[in-house]
Amino acid sequence: MSRRLIGPFDQILPMTGLPLKGALKDQQLNIIEDGGIIVNDGKIEAIGLYDNLKSANPEIELEVLKFAATALPAFVDSHTHLCFDGSRAMDFAERNAGTSYQDIAAAGGGIWSSVKHTRAASKERLVALMLYRSKQLIKGGVGTVEVKSGYGLSVAEEMKMLEAIAWFNRKSPLDVVSTCLAAHIIPKDIEGGESAHLQMILEELVPKIQAQNLCNRFDIFIEENAFSTKGAFQYLSTLKSMGFDLTVHGDQFSVGGSQIAIEVGARSVDHLEVSGEKEIAALAKSNVIATALPGASIGIGCPFTPARKLLDAGVALAIASDWNPGSAPMGNLLTQASILATFEKLTTAEVLSAITFRAAAALNLNHVGTLDVGQQADIICFPTRDYRDVLYHQGSMEVVRFWKQGSKL
């Protein structure tokens, strides 16, 4: 790959020099005007004023931009259920007609409906569906995406999903982080309930995952119609002792999940729509990243994650799409983040941080999420001279250039 200088950009927002935790003002953003980026071997070699970089490197290949251009690190979508088959349009219609998410699930809809559809799909079909959906991710500027299993809920079907995610990772230009969510709900076709299912995961599924090195990250849904705080604590503690990274679906409809995430030292706790002052204060004292999933609030019609209170308390906030067939089928990270910003009064700096380096930290990644020397050259470009236009257009301003590891997509 040739060494070259890309630019000039009207603005570059490298998203460097910002704290991981707490509130941010737009004045804290480091903005490079009339900037350029030297890319070499998939990484950023230098970043600064375009004319200075050009004069200091007279023999370098130039990739000249002749349009309004603002550069950002490629976005990181740190929570998705991208690996699925089937539609839950019926669930959506029933929720809009007044039936609760929990009642739909109890009647055989909800997650179990997606389990049945996904179990019936071949591995090849799941890969093809993820590749199709990834086109929307790329169009929206996402360069790194987390993908969960969790619609298999048996050893064979969870392995099918995780193998499909690994296959998708090899075929897609995106960086893909795989997470095992075999503890999504208690499957209806297992005897012994919660304890039997969690034991099956630990004793039968985990060794197979380790043998193929399919993922290093586990998740669990802690909720009244899913897994208890007691069962989740024991399960996550065992996985932690085995060296796995942890994340938690917590505080979506009832509290308790965020506290378990803190106690087991999870990387993140995601949802938090019902987190109150007690939960927010506890998260602020921890290193757990709070991930807001505004798409789920839009899909279900419930309050948003209290993002403003979390940031003001000193919590690290990420924002992810939660792209899934049930509660969050939109999948557009930038639109969701823009809507959350409006309702929670988030600064542009807070939103951009939440979908770049703070989201990367939720995935335990340090090579993406910023534009800095030595970082992976994942660069997106919007057709504007003012970075504030990106959220102002609420996702309708599309990425016009995308360099993944320095190569144009």
Image (tube, helix red, strand yellow):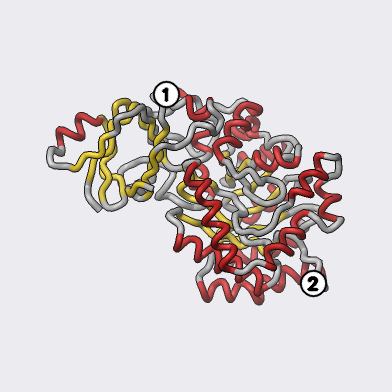
Along the line of sight, which residue is nearer the eye, 44 or 365? 44
Position of 50 with respect to 192 (left or right) is left
Q: Which residue corresponds to the image point at 25% horizontal and 53% vertical from the top-left?
A: 1
Indicate the position of residue 215 as horizontal and vertical percent values: 54, 65
Q: Which residue corresponds to the image point at 13% horizontal and 41% vertical from the top-left?
A: 59
Q: Which residue corresponds to the image point at 85% horizontal and 40% vertical from the top-left?
A: 97
Q: Is residue 130 above or below residue 340?
A: below
**Quarter of the rendering containing residue 310:** top right
Position of 168 with respect to 101 (left or right) is left
- Is tag 1's residue or tag 2's residue first in the polypeptide sequence? 2
Q: Is residue 340 visible?
A: yes
Q: Is residue 331 above or below residue 181?
A: above
Q: Are marks 1 and 2 in contact (CB under 8 Å)?
A: no
**Quarter of the rendering containing residue 318:** top right
For residue 190, the mark is: 2
Q: Is residue 17 visible?
A: no
Q: Residues within 10 Å of mark 1 (few under 14, many from 20)?
A: some
> Is label 1 or label 2 in front?
1
Along the line of sight, which residue is nearer the eye, 157 or 365? 157
For residue 386, the mark is: 1
What amino acid is at disc 1?
Asp
